[in-house]
Image: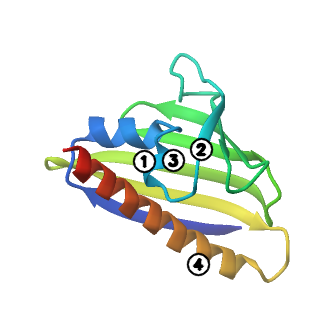
């Protein structure tokens, strides 16, 4: 099993960080992964449990929210897509820290191709750090 974990402290209240991160469509503005759309809304929140997002930059890729605990945790799984990984689980935790918010993003997965796991770990680590930097810039612009 491979894993990646990145953390970032945001200088914004948890309500703002949570709302922007969990809004699938907003990813189009800050994540740097191209347009993101909602394939299926969740319940009772549109981006909550059971919601599915799709990424234009990776046709066919679908991620489904499997746990949604407002202001605390969101979990998701890749349910479709042509990627060299399997058994994917993403867990994103949000914790207040002073006047800000600490976000911890952890993903576990198995590489479909033996020996490729380390490269996927490095690539995902860089990607997630860039995404969280994009979120920080987006939140700063909106302040």
The alpha-carbon separation of the residues under discs 3 and 4 comes to 23 Å
Number of the label disc, if any, that sits on residue 52: none
Mark 4 vs 2: CB contact within 8 A: no
**Depth check: 69 or 13 in front?**
13
Number of the label disc, if any, that sits on residue 36: 2
Which is nearer the N-term, disc 3 or disc 4?
3
The alpha-carbon separation of the residues under discs 2 and 3 comes to 5 Å
Which is nearer the N-term, disc 4 or disc 1?
1
Q: Residue furthest top?
A: 44
Q: Nearer the viewer, mark 3 or mark 1?
A: 3
Task: Residue at 59%, 27% (x, y): give it.
Answer: 49
Say which quarter of the image contains residue 39: top right
x, y (%) of residue 9?
Answer: 27, 59
Describe the element under mark 2 as helix, strand or loop.
strand
Residue that badge 4 annotates: 122
- Compared to residue 60, the image places residue 6 above or below, namely below
Residue that badge 1 annotates: 93
x, y (%) of residue 114?
Answer: 84, 79
The alpha-carbon separation of the residues under discs 4 and 2 comes to 23 Å
The alpha-carbon separation of the residues under discs 4 and 1 comes to 21 Å
In the image, taking residue 33 as reference, residue 113 lies left or right, namely right
Task: Residue at 74%, 49% (x, y): give it.
Answer: 61
Which is nearer the N-term, disc 3 or disc 1?
3
């Amino acid at each position: 099993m491979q894993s990646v974990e990145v953390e970032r402290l945001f200088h914004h209240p948890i309500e703002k960080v949570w709302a922007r991160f969990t809004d699938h469509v907003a990813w189009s503005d800050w994540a740097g992964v191209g347009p993101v759309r909602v394939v299926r809304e969740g319940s009772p929140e549109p981006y909550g449990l059971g919601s599915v997002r799709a990424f234009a930059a990776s046709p066919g890729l679908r991620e489904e929210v499997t746990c949604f605990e407002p202001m605390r945790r969101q979990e998701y799984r890749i349910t479709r897509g042509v990627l060299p990984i399997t058994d994917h689980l993403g867990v994103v935790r949000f914790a207040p820290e002073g006047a800000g918010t600490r976000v911890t993003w952890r993903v576990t997965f198995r590489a479909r191709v033996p020996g490729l796991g380390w490269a996927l770990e490095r690539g995902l680590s860089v990607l997630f750090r860039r995404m969280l930097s994009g979120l920080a810039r987006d939140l700063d612009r909106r302040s």
